[in-house]
Amino acid sequence: MRNLLFDVARGLAIVLVAIFHIVYRTENGTADIFLKESIWLVIPFFFIVSGYFTNVSAGNLLRDAINRLKRLLFPAVLCSVAVLILLGIYCAIFHAYDFRAWSLDVIATYLRPEFFRKIPAFARYDLINALVFDLVSPVWFVWTMALTIPVFYTCARLVNLRKFWQVAIICAILLALTFGLYDYRNDFSWSLIIVPVYAAIMIFTRYLREAGLVEKILAYKNAYIFAVFAFAVHGAMFKTWGSSNIFMNEIGTVGKFSVFAFFVQVFVGAYVLLIFCEFLCCVRYLRKFLRFVGRNSLYFLLMHRFFAAIFSDLVGSYIKSGANWYVEFSGEVFVKSFVAFVLSMICCSVVVKFCEGKCLVNC
């Protein structure tokens, strides 16, 4: 399979996520709606890529899962520790952020807040004023992926990944489990509840690879025309069925059906993303940059908000507190936030390049 295309697509996905997190725009304006729809498209794409490239052997299940988790958790922990310490120091100097607030914030962010709310000392902690929680919130992705991987390995061993009917049954069970968790375990955060549906996405992707369908779909002679149609379908699903709400604390505007709509929408969107990236690959320097970001997507995901927070604070005395929080929009706010985005991506690139030279990444 063309790893270049997948790397470029992952790079574009991270860039869109960074824009969504950093750059201010009018709430529910054209740009905002486009970014929201793009995010629901690109975040599940990482699970499609993971499913495609994760081998399911006949070896030891626990060993395979642990080895896969090591490749995810080592860079995540390494990057997170550095970000948390540096961000805590910055907030202490410029925002009178004391050690107690920092330590409570770290626990509420990197350990699961829904568990610690049952402890009186943490139940009183107000996440609304938690700077670290607001600025490094993309860590939810690591939690979700870390829990999805063992579920994927376990379910993948239960079925023959070359037989569609077996794959369809296990995927249906996982999707049903997702809305079951919404109904009966709503004290969990959505980043944990959506684990089964992401495991289903990985399993179905693996079936597509085993059947050799991915290459055939991407090589289809009218792929570009079909991608335009697929993009329209994706947009219609996003606006009509409300499956974007699978990322929120709601199941979606059409209830439990939203889980199944989301599952379909993910693969439609992934096809559009890959075909679009074939055009981007024609631009040499853009292809080179996006491939670099894609190959180091986890580091960019965990660091971009850190640098953006500092630059936003320095140039405008404001810090964007969350992906769906907005301030009063103006041209000045947009320019400052866009500058923060550009500087954030540059700093992420410099840090990753430095770490590559020291053999700290891609080892």
Image (spheres, grey):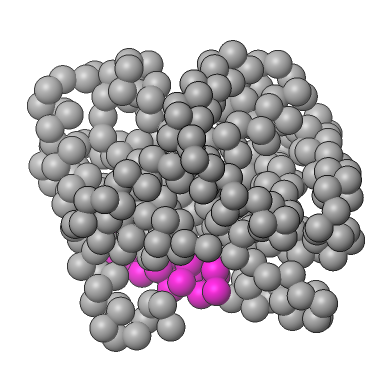
Measured from the top left, where is residue 3 in percent x and y?
46, 64
Q: Residue at x 25, y 73 (%)?
A: 353
* Camera-side residue of 268 and 91: 268
Measured from the top left, where is residue 189 in percent x and y?
65, 41
Q: Quick check: is 323 in the magenta stretch? A: no
Q: Quick check: is 76 in the magenta stretch? A: yes
Instruction: Name the side, left or right, on which 102 lies relative to 145.
Output: left
Instruction: Name the side, left or right, on which 63 lies relative to 6.
Output: right
Residue segment shown in magenta? 71-87
Q: Residue furthest front?
A: 221
Q: Quadrant of residue 70?
A: bottom right
Type of secondary structure dominating the magenta stretch: helix
* Camera-side residue of 260 and 134: 260
Total numbered badges shown on the rendered structure = 0
**Can residue 295 be seen by looking at this rendering?**
yes
Measured from the top left, where is residue 216 in percent x and y?
59, 49
Above-or-below relation of 355 to 194: below
**Can residue 140 be seen by looking at this rendering?**
no
Q: Quadrant of residue 355?
A: bottom left
Q: Quadrant of residue 349?
A: bottom left
Above-or-below relation of 203 to 317: below
Instruction: Name the side, left or right, on which 343 lies relative to 66.
Output: left
Q: Residue at x 72, y 76 (%)?
A: 64
Q: Residue at x 26, y 35 (%)?
A: 23
Q: Quadrant of the C terminus?
A: bottom left
Instruction: Name the side, left or right, on which 96 lies relative to 226.
Output: left
* Camera-side residue of 301 and 57: 57
Measured from the top left, where is residue 82 in percent x and y?
36, 69
